[in-house]
Image (cartoon, rainbow, N blue to C red):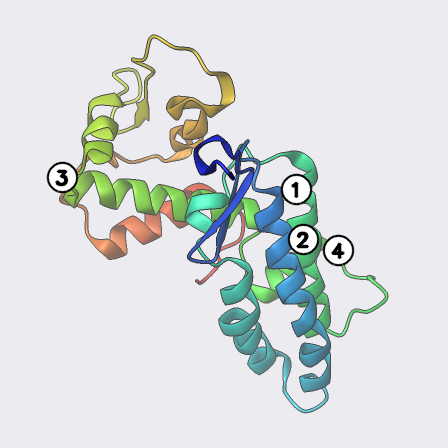
Amino acid sequence: MFDLWRTQIYVYKALGVILSKDLSWEEQVKSQISKTNKLIHSIRHLGRWLKTDDLLKVITSKYFGTMYYASPLWMTSNMPRKTLAQLNRQHYRALRAAFKDRKCKMSKDELNVLSGRATPEEWSKYTVASTVIKMMAISITPMAEKLRKRAYINDRCPGRATFIDRSKNKIGKQSLPNRLSFFKDIKFNWCNSNISEDKLRQELKKAFFKCNNDL
């Protein structure tokens, strides 16, 4: 008789997010790339009639809305380089389609400036930081309490905060402080729960976006 309790599940899909045994998120990225591949032709077709600004709005709402679905969960700074590179290529495919740059004459920096888009890595840091800070401010869940206990105000750099590792088990890159190490780039006291939504958005843009991007 088939024993469900002894069956190992290596990949599991829940609410459109693919979870793998090693949490590498490779299958999730492949899935997002497959979905957005189907949209590239449509974007190029629309480019015959729409101006670039209007086409970028379509790309933001439809293409990137699909590509970055649930990204605060799976698009982390510790993602394998190969997986992040695949995501980057797909990101710039859409921007090149918007600017009709099929021969790839424009650099990535030019595309970033002209489109006003954050790179996948910048967007990852922004969304994760925003989610974590809001969770710490209003949530009463065990995870939020754990984050609050590990937050540390740096005495040498007043106004800055970081996370420290209080666990006994050292698990390298997957430890909470390492996964959130980019918080050290935020130059304001994000532990302050009184910060407004607009102020938080502005400060996180300053911390992570090289270009003055609008979301």
Q: Amino acid at mark 4?
A: Ser
Q: Earlier in the sequence, mark 3 or mark 2?
A: 2
Q: Give the residue pinned by disc 4.
A: 107
Secondary structure of the residue carrying numbered label 2: helix
Distance between the alpha carbons at the discs numbered 2 and 1: 21 Å
Q: Residues within 10 Å of mark 2 (few under 14, many from 20)?
A: few
Q: Amino acid at mark 3?
A: Ile
The C terminus appears in which quarter of the rendering? bottom left
Q: Earlier in the sequence, mark 4 or mark 3?
A: 4
CB atoms of marks 4 and 3 within 8 Å: no
Q: Give the residue pinned by disc 2.
A: 109
Q: Give the residue pinned by disc 3.
A: 140
Distance between the alpha carbons at the discs numbered 4 and 1: 21 Å
Q: Is residue 209 visible?
A: no
Secondary structure of the residue carrying numbered label 4: loop
Distance between the alpha carbons at the discs numbered 2 and 4: 5 Å
Which-is-in-front pick, marks 4 and 3? 3
